[in-house]
Image (spheres, coloured by chain):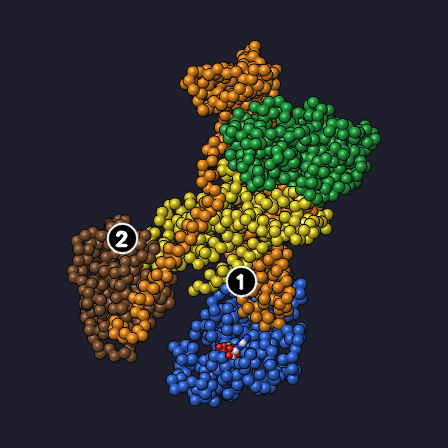
Chain colours: A orange, B green, C blue, D yellow, E brown
């Protein structure tokens, strides 16, 4: 309180010191967010975010979202021969056998095929090359396709709505009920249905279209194995191969993690200050660990794919190489932090180095190592998915390929769900094991 | 190119082995190799590739008496590395991918068969295309725009256009920032089509047989697949360039395979069309007149082009 | 039996133990007292070969031990058990396993690695635990035990070694008075019943006086007192601790005052009874 | 000793119980080890069988590819500095993706962590669903989100950044919340007693306490994200991974460029890894 | 002023505070004593709205406060400062900021987050610290201070709130006797000089007697004594603490015995002097 009296060479008053401190604080409080903001602004421009936003196409998102949970059935007419084919997703595996058709496609005798898209939308395929589409609330579109004249279409009066894309050789109509494409060669009508088509049984299976109850009844009657076979070997979804892919992914993660841990376990001793008195050896081992880690799983995968080709082993080895480095580092750090008291206690009984390691070092490290290993196992389950996409193995490959070819979003969804379930399962498994092995006993 | 293909006739063993009884072969070859690994290139999702080629593997396993496995690496390079490292024994490559292997080690693989189109030809085209609403209709309009290739190992998606496009005009080069404002690799045919359709790149190249109609995406090729899948509306795209015919890539076998195995596989694939038409459709990824023999000579030009373009 | 001749231990510039000579002819219970840093621990650790003397010699029954190497050194350690202030058990292992560590010198490498202890050893370990009154704790993890119990496990490990000599480095410093009393009485009983030599670092005078036959006082690495408990007067203690006028013996005490001090410690209750 | 013997005779139960415990424990350990060995070697056998190349056959070939790369790079050693410079911008892009994702993910993760920490959350009923959401964000591999976003937004760094950022929110949110959970609540209560709002309580009572630890975790995440960013480049998201994939695909003739990219990537990872662990050590040790 | 009417707080099955009714008419210094678990803390925390009563009402100057919500509740908290046994400061922030936290209710969140405290508040904070004799510590981190200093920072934060009432929950339980004295004298001075009401939980009888005008004794959640210090005899204390014959008042004492108790506490040295 009386600080003000001593004028000359007075030490700073608390107020002055506080003000100075506050100013320093303001520098940080305003400086750091400003720097972050500046950096993010730089990123926005260097990554061309404005252009990206301007060009982002909601249509793609719609296709994706729609395709994830629905499928379409194609009714295709060859405008040359007039032959009509009905196929789920337009694929050969979903082709309706000759003479069979879903209820909404009706052969009217003669040359007319009636396709009901629902909601009052009716498409008539007439003859070899004519089409009539009655669109409720709009009117009738009629079109004729020919090699010479292209696609000649007539529309109700008024300007063309934007859901009709008409050119001289092609007319495409997209309504909420379905899609119609007419080109010189083909006429295609597509109707959308919610759900994943043929998920359990393909069209050629005797169980297709049966209710769960009926299938249950047949299963009880001794057909269970046949039913299972039909589902398991489903030609379109190929559940057996997907299951194998999951196994391969888990194998990559497990073998990579376990292998790395087993190699790193003894080698880490050479990198720990308190166990490897020889400085140069320690340095060499440490640099080796750094190298293995630094090269990264991605590059190891690329390198190994020459020697091992595609498959899960390549991925497992790539994970193993990187993680040997990671574990080596982690393990040697834990080794340097061991409790010397316990070791000394065992040492004082005359125990040799091996016995000491087994009875005083290992018990301390086991819980630490286990939790590190299990943590890596969890994270490697995700890595294995990614590495599989590069090496050609596991669910990662199926997933990325399905995404890249961009038409089978329902497969993508299926795989994503499986991947997420797999990762969740792995998380809870390792959590369970951790509790069991570390806290239990 | 058709003549060069017909030059390479069948080897005597091939015709004789065709009528050897299957059991015999299965017995005698069991100890020659313990398994046969077939690599299948991209273009479809991995599962469809497996499905399409499984029948071939089954036939081969039956004939050879060993396990036959299908591998579907993520990209061209995966197959190339597998063949170079010897972990894959057989693959149907693009011409440029074959050239890549040949340049790196001519002893690794030998071309044996090529797919023929319905009309008997065995060529296709690299197609340059853009969005209709971009106003681009030819390479001249592409000055200062972004151009996209597919995979660096693709013949139609990279090698051929990278040679032929600069030849179209005095000022055209493939150096990013010169004629085109940027030249990028999208990673594959499918990615190129989506990138052009989305406007990420102004034009790109992909493959098509060039038969049939543009509005259908031609009879076969990446555009047809995308159009069938509803990813693109062909009305919105326009062709801006077309390459000279590109020879279809070869089916190759690892040179070190025992001759009997090679003969057996050549025989199987060549006659696949008559044995099982559906299987042939799947393996050839579309309608085909079947496979016929071919040799390295047919690809010498491509190999030369690749050597000049990329090196090796 | 045990003869130390000008034993010195130098750590960098500090001389932790400075020319200590001692001769202990019979199995005695020796207490070593001294202020913190006096060199008590270092001295004991040299006896167990956890440290090597910088100079001087340590001989047991005529054999020089300070120069033993490798397996022989470990053989000596097996004969000369050590008990630590912090117990130095393996906390995550069960009590019996900790006791069985006392046999590690004689166990073969394979046995040691697999921890497949012979049944007779397990029985012996449990009977020792019973003697110390903690057999009930046998299957528990060491970390689950109280400090006093842990120290008794450490003593059991020492007994498992069947040693000629037990060294105890401030065995009761981490314990509350009650447990301290149990542990000290246990040690005394072992000395009385088995006739083993015990050398025990202590930092409280009264404990040393009460339990030891001979007391050695150290100060700054040197032996400044060596005699019977009776000879250890407050004046002498003041010298040992280098304390100024305010030195109060009370401050170093851990004794439980409200316990009947009647029973002379030499004939203390049997350990089994002492363990409550 | 006689004393001990008699008591042991009186109570043999302890010994027998212990011996029984030891034998069941041995049984469990042996079974566990057997299962592990079976899983490992069985798994190895399956992986080997399902792989194109076999383990032993490929072993001598491991260095074939690096040898090709190194020999071509050595031939064109003079070009190396130029190539390093040429690909440096790509590296910057990769690092920018990682840094941006870590920054955004870290900031959002910090908010999320406060919302899911018991004792701090303003809406306790939202803890469980938000935690599941964080779990989900962590479970989906970045590559999945990235590829879908590439489909929606087109190629380039932004999809990668968003994908990595989402994953970062999930993992940092969880780690941050674990740190916050162990922070003493005294200061929060002190602030509550003066009438501070939730935001103020968090900003003054929690953030200063957990800040260094949070920062340390974020740095670790940055290291991981650089690797993720490189990998995503490999599947089409730009940056050094894109160049690596292309040069690698070109193969012979471009191996010198591949080598330059390898080097850039390796050096970056090592530098960030070493520098990061140095700073992290400072942050976590400089406390208490 | 402050009226509690059958205030009850139930935690699961335990009734921490059981029908407590109190009426404090003028700003008094009230001490609440009771054994551990008697419900003292819970009572205070309800006054500050850190807990809500399960039943009963708390009114201040006629206004019911126990039902206030959101911003109004925080407004009441701002008027009713609280001091904790563990100080409850933000250890990693500087002292002045900790004191300024007392103004959080009135300062906008943005100002507070950016540390753009009004200059007048900073001056006021420092003058309060000066009054409590710890202005020198102003720019230091709170964690760098001793316990006694930290508690004075907490008091400064309370004063910064310019509260109508200060609640103190065992403010000296974590302090050594010397610091305890300083803190209690500070509180008393604040009461005397500023005329603020102070309700203070204490677990030692002598402190309560020495510093408080009125003492409330609690046992098992109920008020069992309410009177002046003079009325608090040892017999009454025994009732409050539920102690048996061995109860010794001494055991609850924290007084510094060797200090001259001459100066009557009511006229204690000014806080600035008390701070050594
Ligand atoms: N490993 C070592 N390295 C360096 N100096 C040491 C070491 N061990 C002990 N010292 C030093 O030697 C001196 C004697 O230490 P010692 O532990 O033997 O004392 P003490 O009498 O057991 O004390 P305390 O009661 O603290 O255990 C001390 O100054 C100590 O700092
Ligand atoms: N949040 C809570 N949840 C459950 N029970 C509680 C809670 N807070 C206090 N209690 C219980 O209420 C009773 C009174 O506790 P309170 O802390 O008020 O006592 P106290 O008199 O302050 O004791 P101390 O001297 O130990 O601080 C105790 O039995 C306590 O266990
Ligand atoms: Mg010591
Ligand atoms: Mg309390």
Residue C179 position (above or below residue C23): above
Looking at the rendered image, the quarter that the N terminus of chain D falls into is bottom right
Q: Position of residue B38 (x, y in %)?
A: 70, 37
Horizontal arrangement in the rendering, residue B120 relative to residue E83 (left or right): right
Query: Residue D205 appears in which quarter of the rendering?
Result: bottom left
Chain letter belonging to callout 1: C
The structure residue drawn at horizontal position 74% and vertical position 33%, both measured from the top left corner, is B298
Q: Which residue is mark 1?
A: C92
Distance between the Cα atoms at labels 2 and 1?
A: 49 Å
Query: Residue B205 appears in which quarter of the rendering?
Result: top right
Q: Position of residue B120 (x, y in %)?
A: 71, 24
Q: Position of residue C88 (x, y in %)?
A: 53, 69
- Circles 2 and 1, Cβ within 8 Å, touching? The answer is no
Q: Is residue A325 visible?
A: yes
The structure residue drawn at horizontal position 58% and vertical position 44%, both measured from the top left corner, is D242
The structure residue drawn at horizontal position 59% and vertical position 45%, both measured from the top left corner, is D243
Q: Are marks 2 and 1 on the same chain?
A: no
Q: Which residue is mark 2?
A: E74
Q: Nearer the viewer, residue A264 or B80?
A: B80
As helix, strand or loop, the secondary structure at mark 2 comes to helix
Q: Position of residue A146 (x, y in %)?
A: 57, 15
Q: Nearer the viewer, mark 2 or mark 1?
A: 2
Residue sticking out furthest to the front: B170
Horizontal arrangement in the rendering, residue B6 relative to residue A223 (left or right): right
Q: Nearer the viewer, residue A422 or C271?
A: A422
Looking at the rendered image, the quarter that the C terminus of chain D falls into is bottom left
């Amino acid at each position: 309180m009386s600080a003000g009296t001593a004028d000359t060479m007075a030490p700073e008053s608390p107020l002055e010191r506080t003000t100075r401190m506050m100013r320093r604080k303001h520098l940080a409080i305003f400086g750091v967010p400003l720097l972050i903001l500046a950096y993010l602004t730089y990123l926005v421009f260097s990554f061309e975010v404005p252009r990206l936003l301007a060009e982002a196409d909601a249509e793609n998102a719609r296709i994706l979202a729609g395709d994830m949970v629905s499928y379409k059935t194609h009714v295709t007419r060859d405008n040359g021969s007039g032959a009509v084919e009905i196929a789920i997703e337009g694929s050969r595996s979903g082709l309706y056998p000759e003479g069979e058709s879903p209820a909404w496609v009706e052969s009217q005798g003669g040359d007319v095929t009636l396709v009901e898209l629902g909601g009052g939308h009716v498409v008539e395929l007439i003859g070899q090359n004519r089409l009539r589409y009655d669109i409720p609330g709009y009117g009738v579109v009629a079109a004729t396709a020919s090699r010479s004249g292209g696609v000649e279409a007539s529309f109700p009066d008024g300007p063309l709505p934007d859901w009709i894309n008409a050119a001289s050789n092609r007319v495409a109509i997209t309504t909420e009920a379905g899609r119609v494409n007419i080109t010189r060669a083909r006429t295609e009508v597509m109707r959308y249905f919610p759900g994943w088509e043929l998920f359990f049984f393909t069209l050629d299976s005797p169980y297709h279209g049966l209710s769960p109850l009926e299938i249950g009844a047949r299963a009880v009657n001794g057909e269970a194995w046949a039913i299972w076979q039909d589902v398991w070997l489903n030609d379109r979804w190929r559940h057996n191969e997907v299951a194998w892919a999951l196994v391969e992914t888990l194998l990559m993660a497990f073998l990579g993690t376990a292998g790395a841990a087993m190699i790193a376990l003894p080698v880490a001793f050479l990198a720990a200050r308190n166990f490897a008195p020889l400085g140069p050896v320690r340095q060499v081992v440490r640099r080796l660990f750094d190298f293995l880690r630094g090269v990264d799983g991605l590059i190891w995968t690329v390198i190994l794919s020459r020697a091992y080709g595609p498959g899960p082993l390549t991925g497992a080895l790539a994970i193993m190489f990187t993680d040997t480095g990671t574990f080596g580092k982690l393990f040697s750090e834990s080794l340097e932090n061991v409790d010397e008291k316990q070791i000394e206690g065992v040492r004082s009984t005359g125990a040799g180095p091996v016995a000491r390691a087994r009875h005083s070092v290992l018990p301390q490290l086991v819980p630490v190592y286990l939790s590190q290993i299990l943590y890596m196992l969890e994270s490697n389950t995700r890595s294995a998915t990614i590495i599989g996409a590069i090496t050609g193995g596991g669910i990662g490959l199926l997933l990325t390929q399905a995404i890249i070819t961009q038409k089978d979003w329902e497969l993508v969804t299926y795989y994503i769900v499986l991947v997420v379930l797999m990762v969740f399962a792995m998380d809870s498994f390792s959590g369970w094991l951790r509790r069991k092995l570390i806290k239990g006993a | 190119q058709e003549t060069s293909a017909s030059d390479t006739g069948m080897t005597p063993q091939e015709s004789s082995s065709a009528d050897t009884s299957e059991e015999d072969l299965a017995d005698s070859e069991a100890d020659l190799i313990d398994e046969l690994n077939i690599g299948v290139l991209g273009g479809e999702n991995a599962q469809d590739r497996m499905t399409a080629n499984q029948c071939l593997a089954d036939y081969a396993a039956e004939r050879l008496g060993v396990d036959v496995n299908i591998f579907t690496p993520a990209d061209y390079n995966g197959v190339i590395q597998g063949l170079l490292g010897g972990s894959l024994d057989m693959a149907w490559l693009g011409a440029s991918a074959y050239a890549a292997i040949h340049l790196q080690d001519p002893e690794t693989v030998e071309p044996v068969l090529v797919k023929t189109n319905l009309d008997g030809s065995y060529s296709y085209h690299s197609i340059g295309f853009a969005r209709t609403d971009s106003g681009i209709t030819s390479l001249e309009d592409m000055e200062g725009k972004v151009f996209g290739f597919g995979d660096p190992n693709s013949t139609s998606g990279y090698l051929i256009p990278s040679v032929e496009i600069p030849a179209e005009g005095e000022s055209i080069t493939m150096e990013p920032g010169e004629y085109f404002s940027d030249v990028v690799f999208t990673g594959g045919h499918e990615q190129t089509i989506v990138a052009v359709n989305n406007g990420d790149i102004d034009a790109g190249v992909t493959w098509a047989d060039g038969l049939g109609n543009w509005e259908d995406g031609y009879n076969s090729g990446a555009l047809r697949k995308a159009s069938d899948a509803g990813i693109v509306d062909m009305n919105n795209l326009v062709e801006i360039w077309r390459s000279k015919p590109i020879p279809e890539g070869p089916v190759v076998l690892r040179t070190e395979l025992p001759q009997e195995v090679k003969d057996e596989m050549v025989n199987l694939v060549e006659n696949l069309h008559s044995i099982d038409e559906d299987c042939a459709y799947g393996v050839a990824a579309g309608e085909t007149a079947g496979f016929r023999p071919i040799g390295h000579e047919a690809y010498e030009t491509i190999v030369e082009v690749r050597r000049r373009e990329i090196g090796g | 039996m045990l003869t130390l001749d000008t034993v010195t231990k130098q750590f960098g510039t500090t001389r932790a133990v400075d020319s200590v000579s001692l001769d202990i002819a019979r199995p005695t219970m020796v207490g070593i007292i001294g202020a913190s840093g006096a060199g008590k621990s270092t001295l004991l650790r040299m006896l167990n070969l956890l440290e090597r003397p910088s100079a001087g010699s340590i001989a047991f029954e005529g054999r020089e031990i300070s120069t033993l190497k490798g397996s022989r050194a470990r053989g000596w350690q097996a004969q000369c058990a050590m008990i630590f202030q912090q117990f130095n058990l393996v906390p995550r292992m069960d009590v019996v396993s900790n006791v069985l560590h006392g046999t590690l010198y004689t166990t073969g490498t394979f046995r040691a690695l697999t921890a497949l202890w012979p049944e007779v050893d397990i029985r012996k370990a449990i009977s020792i635990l019973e003697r110390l009154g903690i057999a009930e704790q046998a299957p528990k993890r060491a970390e689950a035990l109280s400090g006093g119990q842990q120290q008794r496990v450490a003593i059991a490990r020492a007994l498992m070694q069947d040693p000629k000599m037990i060294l105890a480095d401030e065995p009761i410093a981490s314990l509350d008075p009650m447990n301290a009393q149990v542990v000290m009485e246990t040690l005394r009983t072992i000395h009385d019943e088995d006739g083993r030599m015990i050398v025990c670092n202590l930092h409280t005078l009264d404990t040393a006086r009460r339990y030891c036959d001979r007391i050695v006082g150290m100060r700054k690495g040197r032996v400044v007192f060596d005699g019977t408990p009776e000879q250890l007067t407050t004046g002498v203690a003041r010298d040992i601790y280098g304390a100024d006028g305010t030195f109060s013996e009370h401050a170093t005490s851990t004794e439980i005052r409200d316990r009947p001090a009647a029973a002379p410690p030499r004939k203390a209750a049997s350990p089994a009874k002492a363990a409550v | 000793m006689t004393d001990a013997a008699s008591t042991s005779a009186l109570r043999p139960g302890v010994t027998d119980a212990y011996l029984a415990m030891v034998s069941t424990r041995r049984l469990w350990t042996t079974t566990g080890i057997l299962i592990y060995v079976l899983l490992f070697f069985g798994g190895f056998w399956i992986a080997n069988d399902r792989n194109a190349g076999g383990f032993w056959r490929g072993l001598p070939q491991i260095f074939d590819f690096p040898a090709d790369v190194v020999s071509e790079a050595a031939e064109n050693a003079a070009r190396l500095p130029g190539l390093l410079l040429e690909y440096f911008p790509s590296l910057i892009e990769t690092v920018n993706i990682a840094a941006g994702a870590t920054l955004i993910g870290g900031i959002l993760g910090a908010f999320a962590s406060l919302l899911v920490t018991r004792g701090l959350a303003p809406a306790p009923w939202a803890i469980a669903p938000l935690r599941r959401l964080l779990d989900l964000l962590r479970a989906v591999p970045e590559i999945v989100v990235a590829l879908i976003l590439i489909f929606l937004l087109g190629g380039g760094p932004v999809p990668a950044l968003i994908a990595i950022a989402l994953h970062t929110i999930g993992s940092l949110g969880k780690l941050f919340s674990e740190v916050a959970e162990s922070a003493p609540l005294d200061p929060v209560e002190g602030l509550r007693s003066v009438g501070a709002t939730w935001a103020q309580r968090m900003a003054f009572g929690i953030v200063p306490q957990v800040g260094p630890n949070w920062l340390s975790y974020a740095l670790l995440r940055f290291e991981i994200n650089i690797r993720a960013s490189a990998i995503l480049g490999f599947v089409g998201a730009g940056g050094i991974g894109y160049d690596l994939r292309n040069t690698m695909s070109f193969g012979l003739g471009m191996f010198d460029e591949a080598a330059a990219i390898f080097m850039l990537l390796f050096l970056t990872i090592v530098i960030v890894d070493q520098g990061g662990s140095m700073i992290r050590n400072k942050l976590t040790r400089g406390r208490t």
